[in-house]
Amino acid sequence: MRIALLTEGGYPYARGEGGAWCDRLVRGLPHHDFDVYALSRSPRTEAGGQVAPPEQVRRVLTERLWGDPPPDDAGDRSRAARRARDAAFRWHYGEFTAALAGGRDAAPAEERAERFAAGLYGLAEAAAEHGGLPRLLTGHDALLTLETACRAPGVRPLLGDITVSELLTATALLERQLRPLSLPWYGPEHLGSADVCHAVSGGPAMLPGLLAKRFCGTPLMVTEYTVRLREALLAHRAAAFTPAVRALLGTYHRLLAGEGYRTAALVTPGSTHVRRWQERCGAPRERMRTVHPGIDATRFARAGEAAEAEAAAPAAHADPTVAWVGRAEPAKDLIALLHAFHAIREEEPQARLRVFHLRSATEAAAAYLEHCRTLAAQLFPDEAAHAHAVGESPVSFEEIGSPGAPELADAYAAGDVVVLSSSSEGFPLSLVEAMLCGRPTVSTDVGAVREVIGGTGLVVAPRNPKALAEATLALLRGPERAARLGAAARERALALFTVTTCVDAFRESYLDVVAHHPVPREPLWSAAGAPRPFTSPAESWSPTRLAPSLLTGEHPR
Amino acid sequence: MTPRPTTPADIAPLHLPLPAAADTAPATAPEPAAVPGAAAGSATFAELWARAGEALADAPAPAPPAEPTAGPTAEPPAEPTADQGPDAPPTTTVPDEALTDGEPAEAEAEAEDAGADRPAGGDGAAEGSSGGEAGSPGRPDAFAELWAMVGDAVEEALSENRRAAGPDAAPPEEPGDADGNDQESAQKAPPTAEGVASGESIWHARSHAPSAPDARADPAPSVPDAGGRPAADDVLSAEAEPEDEVEAVTVSVPGPRAPGGERGAAVMAPSAPRGKAAEPAGGRAAPVRDGAGPGERAGGGRVRRRGPADPVRQVMHRHQTLIAGAVDVWEIAAGLEAHGVTDVDARRLRHRDVFGLAEELYARVPRAGQIAEPVQGEREGAWLHPPRAARYLLPGAVCAVAGRFLPAEAVTALVLVAAYAVLRRGPLHAPGRSAALWVCGLLALTSPTAPGLAASLVPAAYGAHWFAVRSRAQLAPSHGLDDFADAVRPRLAAVLAGYTAVLAALLGAAGPVAAPAALGLLLFATRLLALHGRAATAAAVLGAACAAEALYRLATVLGPGGPRAGAHALICGAAAAVAVVAAFRTLSRAAAHRPT
């Protein structure tokens, strides 16, 4: 089977987000062929270079969604051809912007979505036929069309008062987002040759998939581990765009997401947390299937087995240790953890807290870590066993990789209880790692935590150090219960959150999608467009290669 | 009828023991009598009482209507909290599904209270208490244990309470408490529509009595302004016997202090030693404490008043900047989720999920500054720095110097070389090779010798820079594309006219003016076109002029007559006119002035 992976700021780039699970997916399915079509989000993404893909990845094609538009390959066009092109552009772009701006005639949601889709596909067809779309998108016609759409009756006053500089900004940003329309990827030798398009994130990554479905009939599958729409909205706010520009861009992302979910043959959210947004954007429930992300369990195998052995004879330690592992950021709310530990120490004077943090990525994160260290120094003075001993603070901040915790598994194993005190979280991978190490967890009820924990750990409300302290104390004082929870957590993690589970789920999904939505091309479909049933047997979709490779003479796997 | 609670937590019955009827009967006996004798707020107290009775009547557990009269019985605090029985560890407020491992203790009720941004539903008190009201009577031993826990909590709370601070002190600082919204709660003086106002304790006045022990020791109703609370006091003191530290600890002093009794009796906290100062809850006024938002966790039977009657207001205030600056509901939802507001919190605020909450917030918070004001940035200097313009003197100098010694074609060639070197950077630099080629061709054909033309590069540079800067400055203040075009056209006309005038002045002294001036205007206009992205148009015009010149040359060579005087001027003038018309049409569009 040939799978086209559509990524945006992700997989082949070393600095891409979410590239790790893509790599695991690709390596976990060695019998399929992959083509990677990557869109890069910013110069920072490209600056990090690309990871070396395995041999299943046949080719990697890239395109930029930033920077100046590509130079116009304006060949000699006759005046009539240019007129036709401009007229088609004005029409389709008019539909597109009318959907973006809203208004009386585009008010109902379905109509708006239809107009958006019509405009988008019309622009794509015009680009394929005439070319020169980037220049048109930043030209005078585009500005005029957008202004007319914004001043149409029934449009909200925020857009009605749009200024010229905002128009320029909006058209420039939309041109960047619509760059995939001008790419030559939608022919029979690129996306048309794939059996299924797998968009590994929502948002702009879905756009090539939509066009492939439109032009070549390739089915689309969308996987989302973080809500791309939400990230886009927050990024626009952080980039300090003016409100009118944010309104237009936000609507674009939302309508694109909705169109993508509706067109997709299968939508796989990573957790219920993501699923809510997808359903809100219009994803149909009957085509959704939750596939949790999987992480490599072998790194934690030793720690997990040690925890299982300990569970046979649970005993409270003399110095009960609470561990926190992760990246120190304000969203992780380490301050609440420190306050909770303060309360814990009043009850359990021998308790210790070990904070294992990864290296800070940004200045703000480093400053926050320093702030936490200061607070810990104020709250927890050094203590010593007796008058002649060197004291140390019960709270220690260690970086993962230092001798105290050379590996992540060691960090988790160092604690009797692992605590997650975030005030906001997406999918808590650190919790999954703690579960794999067989550690009982106490976490705050944010994001997908409840779904991940599922009863094998304690969940408290966020920003509540007292509750956190009481829950942790209960576990520290009850080693049997802690051991039970830890064992249950490890079993749950091994059942749900391993790479093999995730990869198997995707393999089944691929087969499912391909079986129900075959691409209409020879020999399955005749040249006239009529399907030819029974042309190719079911084994043709098998992931194994049934015949030995002629070049290398290897045996079929 | 107060609305029913919707979450499981809300309707979980509170199996808290009520004191035996015998205990409470005498205590409650004087109560009804005291009610009519209460001070000004007592009329509302009766209303509260009736409401409490109703709520209790609907409570899931079979609680007799007299239940509410049982003094400081275990009533859940105002919030829709899932209170477990007294045998369970402290009650929790997080809904059941949040509790993992079946341990109710884990999801602490304090969580709800502490979160100022997760206030209880406005009329949560009614539901919560009605749900919790159904204390099962007749478990005095458990109740005593309960009271012991309550006492511990109150003791702890007392240590931080601002009892000593007097009536107007700020709300006590308690660990884990979120920002106190007590001030807000203070504002809801009269009973709100739900009847239960911001849960000021009926013992509120007592807390401001000289000392708590005195108040406690004095069961008589003579609390200074607790007009209608004698019975309550009795009840409390009667119940408080086993307890050492039941104190009427008011959490906050409201500004407008309503006459006592009017604030519904703070709901007696259920078992949970909330560890916070809680106001002693009058068992009667069950639905009471609703408004008190989240903070009210009754530790030891006292409910703390924390929060306004409208809990969504706290969320509004906390995320004020986010909501006021958002353009639509989706942005608010995204921002709330990034700040950690979850569906659980939204459900507590009576919405199905965060999106519903975002819709309400979007509707309620007025938009602030939605129209972007044109940013008055630093005004870019419209006039070139003389040092930068100095390089443009080179071609003129070359022309003047070489014109003495060399023939016209050589001079032209030298001037072209100099101009190429000079135009590679600066305000006159425009990408596009074809236009430059046509310029070379044109100059070769016309061979102008006037040094004024070469020297006119300087005013050309000035003019082009001024036009670009001034046009970009018009982008922000313009309200539409037509506005912008109307603002740019006069500037374009001024630039073209100014350049022509300067060129004519430079040429005026030496020789014919018309032909070089027309040529100069043509070159300048096409340069402007190329600078603002219309290189194709510029190249087309120049090419046409070149072709016309070449044809003319051919005609003069082959044809009968000699070169006519005004021919060059005519050709160049026509081309210049075309270029100027094209410039007016395309350079007045906003697309030509994208800020880079």
Image (tube, coloured by chain):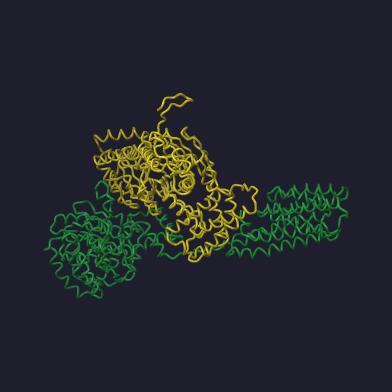
Q: Going by the picture, which residue comes out furthest to the top?
A: A553
Residue A510's image quarter?
top left
In this orientation, does residue B70 appear?
yes
Quarter holding the N terminus of chain B? bottom left
In front: B239, or B122? B122
Look at chain A in the picture and name its colour. yellow
Q: Is residue B36 left or right of residue B497?
A: left
Please provide percent x and percent y for residue B196: 27, 68
Q: Is residue A450 left or right of residue A74?
A: left
Please provide percent x and percent y for residue B511: 86, 58
In front: A121, or B409? A121
In this orientation, does residue A338 appear?
no
* Number of disc labels: 0
Residue A37, placed above or below residue B271: above
Q: Is residue B536 left or right of residue A294?
A: right
Q: Is residue B205 left or right of residue A23?
A: left
Look at chain B in the picture and name its colour. green
Q: Going by the picture, which residue comes out furthest to the left?
A: B22
Please provide percent x and percent y for residue B533: 65, 53
